[in-house]
Image: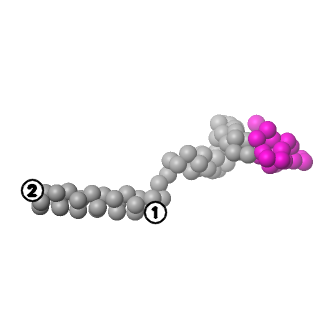
Amino acid sequence: MTDCLAGPPQRAHDGKDGLIAGEAGVLMVVTEILRNEEANIRDRLKAAELLGKHLGLFADKSDLSGAEAFADELMKARERIKDAR
């Protein structure tokens, strides 16, 4: 694994000006940390958390409120259709 924090800034292939890593560079570093079995377990867990958040694997409560509201509206619509028959 490369030590991305040591030394002067390195050129990244996906950053706008070459000094700041873009999305692909960050994902590569996070993935390297996650897969490195010799890395500190806290670092690996944090890498897994960050990658999971980036991939949208975790749902926030605010995300669920929209689904609950949709479900309520759907149930009301079904009741209206049932009553209309």
Image quarter hosting the C terminus: bottom left
Q: Can I make out residue 41 in this image?
A: no
* Stretch in magenta: 1-21
Residue 71 is inside the magenta segment: no
Residue 11 is inside the magenta segment: yes
Q: What residue type is labelled 1?
A: Ser
**Coloring scheme of the render?**
one colour
Q: In this view, does 63 lie above or below 16?
A: below
Residue at (83%, 47%) from the top-left corner? 17
Q: Is residue 31 found left or right of 84 in the rendered image?
A: right
Asked whether 76 or 56 is in front, the reply is 76
Query: Which residue corresponds to mark 2?
Result: 85
Return the residue found at the far right.
8
Q: Is residue 53 found left or right of 8 in the rendered image?
A: left
Residue 21 percent across, percent down from the top left: 77, 46
Residue at (12%, 60%) from the top-left corner? 84
Query: Which residue corresponds to mark 1?
Result: 62
Asked whether 2 or 20 is in front, the reply is 20
Residue 7 percent across, percent down from the top left: 89, 47
For the image shown, how many numbered marks are present on the structure?
2
Q: Is residue 67 above or below residue 31?
A: below
Q: Residues at badges 1 and 2 in contact (C-beta under 8 Å)?
A: no
Asked whether 41 or 53 is in front, the reply is 53
